[in-house]
Image: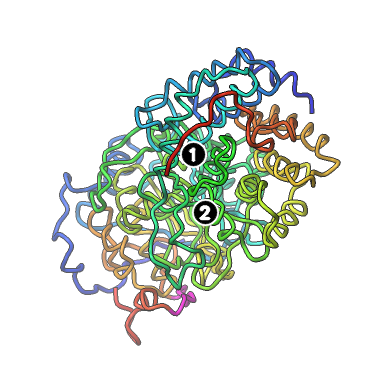
Amino acid sequence: MQLAPILDEFRKQPIVGYHVRTKPSSEPIAWVSMALSIRGDLESAHVGALWLARLQASDGSVGVRLGEPEPRWPTSLAVLTWLTWQAEAGRDTFQPQIELALQWITKSAGKTQPRDPNTGHDTTLAGWSWADNTHSWVEPTAMNVLALRAAGLQDSPRARVGIALLLDRELSTGGSNYGNTTVLGQELRPHVMPTAMTLLALSGESVHPKTRHSLDYLQRTVNGEYAAASLGLAILALTAYQRAPRTAPDWLEATAKRVARRDNAPYKKAILCHAALGARSPVVHLPLNSPATPVSARP
Amino acid sequence: MENARPHSSSPAPAPSAPALFTRRKLLVGTGLAAGGLLAASVLRDLLAQRASVFVARNQSYTGPLSKTIQDGLIATGLQPKALAGKRVLLKPNLVEPSRDVPHMTTHPAMILAAAEAFRTWGAQVVVGEGPGHVRDTEMALDESGVREALDNANLPFIDLNYDDVGWVKNGGNASKLPGFYFPRAVIEADLVVSMPKMKTHHWVGVTAALKNMYGVIPGVKYGWPKNVLHHAGIPETVFDINASLPKTVAIVDGIDCMEGDGPIMGSLKTMGLVVIGTVPAAVDATLCRLMQLNPHRVRYLGLAGNRLGPISDSCIEQRGERWQPLASDFQILNLPHLQSLRPSPGIFTT
């Protein structure tokens, strides 16, 4: 995939929304900044990292958009962004923000509840939620595990619970969805994006049989016409396990053209950039070699 | 199609409902009536606790659905001439699409037909959805077949999960939520058209026009699933969302429906129906009856009754077909909270 044209766009304007018509948002800015950092465009990457730093609340959390401090699930992506920039720049510019955000991540947890025979997953595991005072779900948990791994905290108690949750939420036949396994006795269906995020978060662990099934599910499901963001994350996940399809570059090229033709969505293009970066993407290449002194994020 | 007369009178509304709703208490219809989109008679009927619902039978996805939809909207009080230049948002149900389960989501043919109907009347039509179970809306469009339909009809799509938002105060106050973030596309629309699939729901019994509006709530603010709403109470938030958005009409895909373990894992049940109305609560009540379920026992309809519109059969005028000969038993899970939705044995109470 020709990264240069897309990165040129992002270099000129690193502050982006999910779609062309929408306001700048934390998640797409994080993905763009990380891609720019890896490609050496540190000045432009710094613009996005600084935008996230300015959004950070006093408790360390980062909200979804300017003026919208809640929900706070993008905090983990901000940590990944700052760590990536520091690792590439060789400077600890964002260390205070990182430490404060990790403190928030370590303290925050999804709402647990007693086990329920109608619900297949372990509802007592406290991963991370999308919004405060709600249950733990797959993708916010995966994002936070990635952030903790990036900071060298993969063995911290919160990271271990997060990993346990992700394993628990994998479906018996492979794959994950938003975070339900069986409901009222029926196993639900997997989806590519949460499966990919789960696999990325678990890529530092030994491969569980269910994880092997999840990899198989991704390989047989995605193709060159699959939805852009899901395809990009799937290729990243498969790359993390050295199972990226040989046709991945062609798929990404075709998908990038399709996105440009349809909605030119910055978020989708940023994810595709990461997929094209492959093993160099910071969500694959963990932990990040940040020059700062070890962070302390006590449970 | 002949206009059906109302069914014979039934017992008075549930004792917990207020005896009358006044113009101040009326939570729906006023915005649309003020904009001239509804006939004044619709508002008068609502104040008198009456509404009309249109039922069309023997419908298919390859039939003249656009004409059916226009007939239904006119029969239930929509004013076509007032639609010229208005922004109409079609909101289908694409909660968790799968190519293998087409009866889970609103059929693309329904969306195209509705778009054609409104475009013929001069409206600017967009399609919008915020799937509750999948972050990747593009995947939802592809798996449901809606993407191809949108492209063929040159219909713009707004991803409601990631749109810019505005805050609206909770107009229902059944839950503790002070208000809702609605997508800009929804706030700016002159008319929102709830286009659900007719399905059972394993927690609340039925999912139709009112429950479909969960999909206008943006996931970027509420999560996937939209757990903030679940924790605040599903029936309460279904009511509150609809009470906070008083500019909605309903066009229901009741051709291929879902029974059993809805809204995701249920089985196909073909009914061949399209059900339309300008008072979604009344539409949902009629759908319950078509499914052989008692709407008064569906909690969010109980909340909606007399505040979002009438749900008693005696207060709903059937246009098109009468529901009684078309009603068919929808399978529901053998769980107490669902079995209680069945009408009393031998009697269909309303």
Q: Which percent across, then down, holds residue A198?
A: 61, 49
Q: Which percent across, then down, holds residue B196?
A: 48, 55
Q: Is residue A145 above or below residue A95?
A: below
Amino acid type at circle 2 is Thr
Closer to the camera, A159 or A8?
Answer: A159
Closer to the camera, A257 or B341?
Answer: A257
Q: Residue at x 42, y 44 (%)?
A: A299
- The answer for which chain carries disc 2 is B
- The answer for which chain carries disc 1 is B
| Stretch in magenta | B325-334
Q: Residue at x 27, y 68 (%)?
A: B314
Q: CA distance from mark 2 to mark 1?
A: 28 Å
Asked if the magenta segment contains residue A86, the reply would be: no
* Displayed quadrant of residue B186: top left
Q: Say few, some or many: other residues with alpha carbon within 10 Å of mark 2 (under 14 / 14 to 19 / 20 or more).
A: many
What main secondary structure does the magenta stretch of the protein show? loop
Most extreme residue toward the right is A246
* Displayed quadrant of residue B336: bottom left
Q: Residue at x 46, y 75 (%)?
A: B332
Amino acid type at circle 1 is Leu
Asked if the magenta segment contains residue B328, the reply would be: yes
Circles 2 and 1 on the same chain: yes
Q: Which percent across, then down, holds residue B105?
A: 56, 56
Q: Is residue A30 above or below residue A205?
A: above
Closer to the camera, A156 or B222?
Answer: A156
Q: Which mark is residue B68?
A: 2
Reading the image, the residue beneath label 1 is: B160
Most extreme residue toward the left is B19
User: Is residue A130 shown to the viewer in this render?
Assistant: yes
